[in-house]
Every structure is written in C-alpha cells, then in structure tokens.
Image: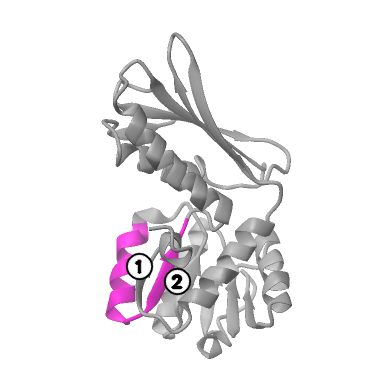
Amino acid sequence: MKIALLGYGKMGKVIERIALERGHEIVLKKDEFNTYDGLSTADVAIDFSVPSAAVSNISASFNANVPVVSGTTGWLEHYDEMIALCNEKKGGFISSSNFSLGVNIFFGLNEYLAKIMNQFDSYKVSMEEIHHIHKLDAPSGTAISLAQGVIENSGYANWTMDEAKKNEIHIEAKRIGEVPGTHTVTYDSAIDSIEIKHTAHNREGFALGAVIAAEWLAGKQGIFTMKDVLNLQ
C-alpha cells in the first residue's frame, strides 16, 4: 500500500517506521516546507499534523481522491465542512482523537460506566488529561471524546475547563515533560471515589492504530470510526 504522510513530526516518523515494517511504501512526507507532490499516487493519506494544517491536508487528499485517516486534533470546528467535502468527492474518512487500541477500549468502558453512574446523583464526574509540553491544543481531543461519551450516556450537557456547573464536566489539562498521554475519569462523592485511567507508555500504540486504520480504509468510501476498524460496535 502507498501511504502519504501529512505531517512529519515525531508521530509521523513513528508511523513511517511502523508502515515500512508492515510492508508499505511512503510516497509523500508532507511538512511545512514542501508541497503535495506525490499525494495523488497514494492509496491512503495519514494526517498527523497541527490544527492549522489539518483542514488543508484533508481537503487536498479528498480533492486528489485519496481517503484520509486523521489523528490531528484541535480543528473540529471545520469537521462538518470536511464531511461535506468527503461526501461530495465520494471519499473515505476516519477522524479520531486517538487511534490506540487501548484508548478505544477505554472509550467503551467510559460510556458503559457513564450509563451506570447516571443512576446515582451523589457522584460528580471530572476528568484530567496530561500530555507533553509540545502539545498545542487543550484539552486533548481524547479528553473531549471521553467527555462526549459521558454526555451521550448521562444527564450532563457540556464540558468546561473552568469551574463546572451542576450539569457540566470539568476537564483539567496538564502539560508535563514528554508524557505521551494519560487520561483519568473520576466519579467523586462525599463517601468514596471511582476512577478509571488510561496511561500511554509511548507513541507506538497511536501510530500502529493509525496504520491499521489506513489499511482498513484503503479502497472504501464513507465516514467511519475506530469502532468500525476494530469491530467494537
């Protein structure tokens, strides 16, 4: 399979290594200094760039009839535009805040726990996410996905980084050293606390999941999620 890497930072380089180990070919390594030459020859594009570049990368891929796997976060105010363009071009698209197998299992656990805890008004949910100091967006896309999973399965209506109202989920974002990513969901009452936590040890899981998603998406049309890729529906 021919892969275009849109974004060639630390994650891009890990994705490149894993893709090559799995027998794939890299036809483009796009960063801020080069063009999209070679994109049209790709079977699939993997976008791990920065929020300011994501929309351009995804748009260029759809316009070149190349399906896209995007792990960039912080650009979702343009998500509906990209979905419309994907449908217009009859493209294929997977956008996820986190491609790690473990995190996607964690998403399912979070949703199941939210359904249970929705019966007990004495518990208040909050979240904490910790990432490396180079991460540009806060809170993380994974934390937002976790909050959305709670909102869809409970009486909570919104998340906030400020002091939370009764129907809001407080998210605390910390930037420390080179932490790959730690996410904690806590249900706290006056009597006790219930906590679930996912800790990434390195970037390998994110990169492997993105390559697996690209392998799955190649040749497909439509809007998909990691639940489709991993058969976690």
Q: Would residue 27 be seen by someone viewing this image from the given angle?
A: yes
The residue range painted magenta reads 78-96
Q: Up-down: is 103 above or below 156?
A: below
Q: First in sequence, mark 1 or 2: give its number.
A: 2
Quarter holding the C terminus is: bottom left
Q: Would residue 147 be seen by someone viewing this image from the given angle?
A: no
Q: Residues within 10 Å of mark 2 (few under 14, many from 20)?
A: many
Looking at the image, which residue sits at the far bottom?
41
Relative image position of residue 109 (x, y in whole percent): 45, 42
Q: Amino acid at mark 2?
A: Ile
Secondary structure under tag 1 reads helix
Relative image position of residue 84 (x, y in whole percent): 28, 70
Q: Up-down: is 146 above or below 226?
A: above
Q: Residues within 10 Å of mark 1 (few under 14, many from 20)?
A: some
Give yes or no for contact between labels 1 and 2 (Cβ–Cβ under 8 Å): yes
Residue 149, quarter of the rendered image: top left
Q: Nearer the viewer, residue 229 or 176?
A: 229
Q: Is residue 33 left or right of residue 139?
A: right
Distance, label 1 to label 2, CA atoms, is 7 Å
Secondary structure under tag 2 reads helix
Per the image, the residue denoted by label 1 is 82
Q: Amino acid at mark 1?
A: Met
